[in-house]
Amino acid sequence: MATWIARLEPSGRGPRLAVKDTIDVAGVPTTMGCAAVAEWAGPAVEDAACVTSARAAGARIVGKTNLHELCYGVTGINQWYGTPVNPLDSALVPGGSSSGSAVAVATDEVDVGYGTDTGGSVRIPAACCGIAGLKTTWGRVPLTGVWPLAPTLDTVGPLGRDVAGLVTGMRLLEPAFTPAGEVVIVGRLRIPGVRPDHDAAVDRALASWGVEVVEVNLPGWAAADAAFEIVIATEAYTADRHLVERHPDRVGPLVARRVRAGAAVTSEAYDAALIARSAWQAELAEVFGRVQLLALPTMAIPVPALVDPAAGPGMNALTRPFNLSGSPALSLPLGGAGNSLQLIGPAYGEELLCSAGADAERAARS
């Protein structure tokens, strides 16, 4: 299996932690899953802030995990380090970009995986591998020592086999983290083009949970999605253009093409996207005045086969607008690869999301 880029030999009895290889661990190179980075990367001088927190909380760092190259993709396919094997179906992609962390959790090699989520990179592999994932509110977890893809979108968050695993992961980041609050009203968001059985699974989960469900419409969805694409293209080009310019044969062609595409985005388009972001955040704030959480599938399409490496764009169609808003989001498995409930909360609503996710889990098991 290509789950790991570097294995360590931890001691102690704390939770076993996998760290995505975009996050610095002292003494270990950070490769970003990319040959162009690995060839010059020396051992990290110090831990990333989130790793420092985890060590202080007693975590045992098992190793650094594989990822979609430069975090710039959601299939998890990696031509340099191999592709982690999806434990639910080896013919399918594991999802990305936090592929190795998801697989390490799903195969019980660790209790918690750290991933990063810029457009769905925690939630998508969680859905593909049948586990839980939590995208944190932008800015809640410090990004010091984390390789950037798009700094105004990037977040660090945990993956776990269930919500209890996510809570363990959050407590490695914030020792006092405690799920809190009871959810009684959820806004059901329906987006055109979603696979019908994914929508049906979400509806069944909400019915078994027993919360009041209110249909919600978000007119700004399409504009937010378009703005996301402009923001990530611009910021990823700034972060990684030097790699594709200096080492064009050491960056995978699909990733290199995406990085280069950012050169075509004008500063005026980027500024307009930031204005659209503010409007989207205001629209969501108004909705969260009426409902406590939003619910929709994590993925609109089936998990692609390994033989379809270009299938990524459709995989995160339902996740990326919430990176633009900076909202916290929880992904909860509903059975089978790709079938997953996504819950969206207001800013800094991780405690409520984890409380709600645990309630939804219990209802599904009863």
Image (spheres, rainbow, N blue to C red):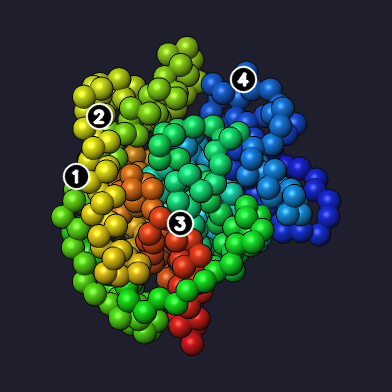
Local secondary structure at mark 2: helix
10 Å crowding of disc 2: few (<14), some (14-19), many (20+): some
Residue marked by disc 4: 39
Label 4, label 3: how many angstroms apart (C-alpha)? 38 Å
Q: Position of residue 221 (x, y in %)?
A: 21, 51
Label 3, label 1: how many angstroms apart (C-alpha)? 24 Å
Q: Nearer the viewer, residue 345 or 282?
A: 282
Type of amino acid under label 2: Asp
Q: Are marks 2 and 3 in contact (CB under 8 Å)?
A: no
Q: Is residue 234 above or below residue 169?
A: above
Residue marked by disc 1: 223
Local secondary structure at mark 1: helix
Q: Nearer the viewer, mark 1 or mark 4?
A: 1
10 Å crowding of disc 4: few (<14), some (14-19), many (20+): few
Label 2, label 1: how many angstroms apart (C-alpha)? 14 Å
* Residue 62 seen in the current view: no
In screen coordinates, is 147 left or right of 333? right
